[in-house]
Image (cartoon, rainbow, N blue to C red):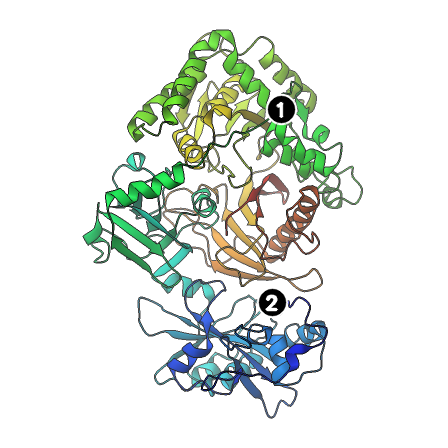
Amino acid sequence: MADDVVSDIAPSLSFLRAPTSAPGSLPLAVAEIDSADTFDAVSTDAGDLVASGRAAKFLIDRRDPSALSPRFVNGNFLRDGVVPDEAKFHYPFGRVTFRIPESLDMFNAVTYFTLDKRYIAGTLRTYHLDGSQDPVYGLQFYPQDLIRERAVVEAVGAIKTRVGIGGARFAFVPTASQQTTAMVTGELAALGIEVLPIDRILGAIQYLPLNLGEAWGYLRVFPSDNNALTPSDIPVFDELPLDLSVVAGVLTRAVQDTNSHVNLKSKERRTPNAVLRNAGPDNPRLAPFADQPVHLVVGRDDFTLDRTTPEIIAAKLAERMGRPLIRLEWLPETELRSYDEIAAGTTREARGSAARYGSKAANLGFLAHRGVLGRVADVGSPSAERGYELVPRGFAVPLQAYRDFIEHPPNADVRSMIEAFVAAEQTGELSPQQRTERVDDIRSAIMAASFPPGALERVRSKLDEVLPDVEKVKVRSSANAEDIPDFDGAGLHDSYSANTTKRDRPMGPCLVEEDDADDGDVKRKVKPKSVGCAIKGVYASLWNKRAVEERSFARIDQDSVAMGLAIVPAYDAESDVAANAVVVTRVLNTDGVYGYSVSAQQGNNLVTNPNPGTYSEITIAAFISDDEPTSLTVTRFAKPTADAPERTEPVLPSERMLELVDLAKQVERAYCRATPGYYPDCDFAPAANDKDTALDLEVKVLEDGHLVYKQVREFGGR
């Protein structure tokens, strides 16, 4: 159970000693909360799906249903100067307070996974809605709890009678779809308790911290030119842009996609990020600081802005940029290999091929391994069980091919431009405009460059071998500066569609044009739409302005980067795309909930790079072990198109969402076993919320019901 996973509940049962506390302090078990001050005294910072607010656990002894016995947990109770387990978790609290005899597993069974409960465990926590200073006191239960209807009335009624905070507003907050109240809304209203689902609460909170932290920079309120932003700026946006340069911190007025590339990068580089729903040039807390040097602190319950000096801003940036450069090592390789060839050995060997092909291509081989998602021919694999391939067929082009392309003698001008730019970039003296102009020139030169003799022919030969008769393919980036520890590179590079029947021009450059088709997947297209031009387009994207800036900020040696390729069939070749999904194998923005974060979007609009004015559905899949049910909690419904209202129903049925979660568990356990140091207990890794990193999986759901796994990468943010 999420709050009842207690490691080694002391073999001596030492926590059963009578609680002791300093004179005048509140005891471990509190029978009533008679004031807001008492609530503050027993509550702690909330650690669930909403980062702000305070929470106090409660436990009701229901062994005699006619005489319920509720007690609040004093989360600040101390023994020998520390907070003991019985002040943190329901089960040890019950052992001390009610002398309950059950084992932990039995306690979970009779508390959470039954309607006929022996004990009722929940939380009373505060929410500040619509900018009000007076909180709503939310009564809620763990997402997997089967509590509903009459049981809700009984539980929240028993707790409300023990709370004597004058004029307080109370609400039952269902945290999962099974916690229904449709038949008892009248009874709840008679008790003075409204029903507020999590998505409505999130929609009414004015301030939502997404990544806590502090930053020093110049506050830019609704900047007119995003390309002019620097790592010393703190922009305030109406809506988060799809491509954002490295900045010191971010505030937005619109709700952000938590699984978008921009937000995940903010988490990974530890830059503060928050939603402020009344942000804008006229906001009285922002306006006085516009274009001024400030110190921003994004906290749990609010943000602060204080004046600072240009000298301090420069010093803080110099601290970050003064670290030694990190040189990326990779291995030479001439062979083009299919994902099945990469998967032929062990899963650890498949992962290790990233040193030759980049992580994206290597991880497609890992996913295709018989011990992960496998192929239809691999008896017992997830693909075999479903009767179709979960991982696309295709092949990897090694990093060495990019280096051979750049060092091809006729491309000497390209090589010289890159060398000169890298030298200038590493001085830290280029302005945003200068950087933009120079990388634009490099990309144009790459698009006009020529392939070494036989290089393009080898790619076409491998296409004929691995993807015979496939006309539409996707050429995807697989850089060595991508999906590596502490730098996932999400969204930095471009992928391009190609038609295998189109021949490359014997003379003249390839072009990159904006794609007005709004297909949600490829924002730009190459012309002609040939394999060679698509490869050049991906190679050129290694030198996108944002990719360069992110690498510089991470202190990656720009001279050591190289681009591999992951080539796959077009995702919609067999069927139209019904939805896109992203699974992150931790619950983002909290350490208090065990499970995964799942984002889904209708049609081919992406979760990772949503079209302007749209956002994806966010669902929390809460679980602790495979023999307990997984609950699904929608915290925000999707808005698939800018000119249509938000959906009121999930994008995918619950059966499909649970399938995505179960497959992600299998992938994470296999990844853990193939990656030394990922987590000590690979069987428990999916539920662990103390793991240093998690996985980020991107999946397409086709109209014919098939799933297509685009990639898996390691993600270091929280």
Classed neighbour count for the residue bearing mark 1: other residues with Cα under 10 Å, few (<14), some (14–19), many (≥20) = few
Element type where label 1 sits in the image: loop
User: What amino acid is found at the position of numbered circle 1 in the picture?
Assistant: Leu
- The Cα atoms of the two marked residues, 2 and 1, are separated by 47 Å
Front residue of 355 and 477: 355
Q: Position of residue 633 (x, y in %)?
A: 53, 62
- Based on the displayed image, in which of its 4 quarters is residue 228 positioned? top left
| Residue at x 37% of width, y 54% of height | 274
Position in image of residue 497 (x %, y %): 52, 27
Residue 240 horizontal side relative to residue 693, left or right: left
In front: mark 2 or mark 1? 1
Amino acid identity at mark 2: Gln
- For mark 1, what is the residue? 331
The residue under label 2 is 144
Can you give x and y, in whole percent of width and height, for residue 393 in the image? Answer: 66, 31
Nearer to me, 71 or 650: 71
